[in-house]
Amino acid sequence: MAKGNSNKRTIKAIHDEAMIIARSLQKAGQTKEETRIIAQGIQKGLEQYKKQQSLKERELDKKLKQLKRDKERPVEPEGPPSTVVQDRQHWLPWLLLLLTWAAVAVYTMI
C-alpha cells in the first residue's frame, strides 16, 4: 500500500515541477490554458525520463548481481588445456653450427 502512496507523491511532485518550469517559460500574453498544455508536455517528458532512468538502473543492478554471482561461483577446471606447447628446436642454428665446423675444417686443411 505504501508503494501506491509513494507513486501519488511522485506524480504530484512531477506535476508541480512541470508547472514551475512552464510558468518560468511563460511568454507575455500567454493564456493559462496554453501554460497548462505546456506543463502537461513537460510533465510527460519528465515521466518518460524517470522511467528510462529507472530501467537503466534496473539493468545495471541486474548486471552487478550477475557479476557478483559469477565472482562468488568457484572456478571449475574444464579438463586438459586446449593448447599444448611443444619444445621444438629450430633447424637454422644447427645448420649454421654445421656450416661453421665445415668452414673451420676446410680452413685448417688449406
Image (cartoon, helix red, strand yellow):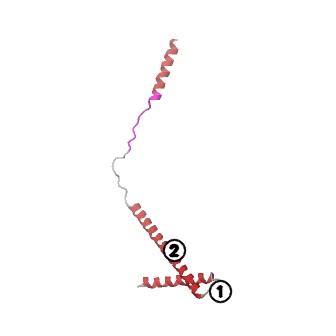
Q: Is residue 67 above or below residue 11?
A: above
- Three-letter amino acid code of the residue under disc 1: Gly
Name which residue lies at 59% across and 82% down.
22
Residue identified by numbered label 1: 29
**Quick check: 31 left or right of 63?**
right
Name which residue lies at 46% across and 25% down.
95
Residue lying furthest top: 110
| Main secondary structure of the magenta stretch | loop
Q: Are marks 1 and 2 in contact (CB under 8 Å)?
A: no
Image: magenta residue range: 83-93
- Quadrant where the image shows the N terminus: bottom left
Looking at the rendering, which quadrant does residue 24 occupy?
bottom right
Residue 40's spot in the image, x, y percent? 53, 82
- Which of the two residues, 85 or 58, is positioned nearer the viewer here? 58
Front of the two marks 1 and 2: 1
- Three-letter amino acid code of the residue under disc 2: Tyr
- Which of the two residues, 63 or 98, is positioned nearer the viewer here? 63
Q: Residues within 10 Å of mark 2 (few under 14, many from 20)?
A: few
Name which residue lies at 39% across and 38% down.
86
Q: Is residue 91 magenta?
A: yes
Name which residue lies at 61% across and 84% down.
23
Residue identified by numbered label 2: 49
Q: Earlier in the sequence, mark 1 or mark 2?
A: 1
Instruction: For mark 2, give the secondary structure.
Output: helix
**Quick check: 25 left or right of 98?**
right
